[in-house]
Image (tube, helix red, strand yellow):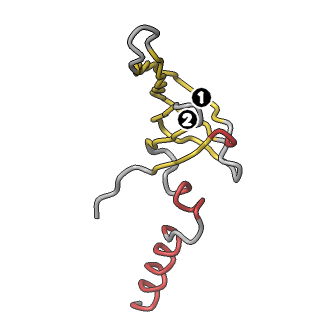
Amino acid sequence: MAAAAAAAAAAAEEEIAVKEPLDLIRLSLDERIYVKLRSDRELRGKLHAYDQHLNMILGDVEEIVTTVEIDDETYEEIVRTTKRTIPFLFVRGDGVILVSPPLRTA
C-alpha cells in the first residue's frame, strides 16, 4: 500500500516538474501571466493556450503601451502609457520577449 502511495506521489511530482522552458508555461495554463512584447508593449492576462513558437491566446487582457516622445522646445523626454482591456487576444510568438508565470508561494 505504501509503495502505491509513493508511486502516486512520484507521478504527481513528475507532472509538476519543470524540465524544459515550456514546462513552466504549461504549468501556467488558466492562470494570469505577464508577457513583454517588442515595441514597449506589456500584457497581463489569463493564458488559455500556447504552442512551441510562443503563440498564445490570452483572455481578460490588460495591455500597457509605453511611448517616449521628445519635446521639440525643451528636448525633454515625455513618457506616456496607455492602457486598455481586451476580452481575447492572439499573441504572435515572434513578438514575445519575456513570459513570466504567476508568483507561487510555497
Give the class, few, some or many, for how many residues have Cα within 10 Å of label 1's Cα (few <14, many ≥20): some
Q: CA distance from mark 2 to mark 1?
A: 5 Å
Where is 101 relative to 93, above or below?
below
In-front residue for pair 70/2: 70
In-front residue for pair 79/102: 79
Where is 8 relative to 48, above or below?
below
Q: Position of residue 90 (x, y in %)?
A: 64, 32
Q: Earlier in the sequence, mark 2 or mark 1?
A: 2
Quadrant housing the N terminus: bottom left
How many numbered circles does the render carry? 2
Among the 4 quarters of the image, the one containing residue 105: bottom left
**Which residue does the image show at 69% across and 42% down from the upper left?**
94
Q: Is residue 80 left or right of residue 96?
A: left
Tag shown at residue 65:
none
Name the kind of residue labelled 1 in the image: Leu
Give the class, few, some or many, for how many residues have Cα within 10 Å of label 2's Cα (few <14, many ≥20): many
Q: Residue furthest left?
A: 106
In-front residue for pair 14/4: 14
In-front residue for pair 13/50: 50
**Which residue does the image show at 59% across and 28% down from the upper left?**
89
Q: Position of residue 68 (x, y in %)?
A: 47, 22
**Which residue does the image show at 43% across and 12% down from the upper left?**
71
The residue where tag 2 is placed is: 58
Where is 19 relative to 86, above or below?
below
**Which residue does the image show at 45% across and 26% down from the upper left?**
64
Verify CB contact (< 8 Å) between mark 2 and mark 1. yes
The residue where tag 1 is placed is: 89
Q: Is residue 90 left or right of residue 24?
A: right
Q: Position of residue 106 (x, y in %)?
A: 28, 64
Where is 82 relative to 14, above or below?
above
Name the kind of residue labelled 2 in the image: Leu
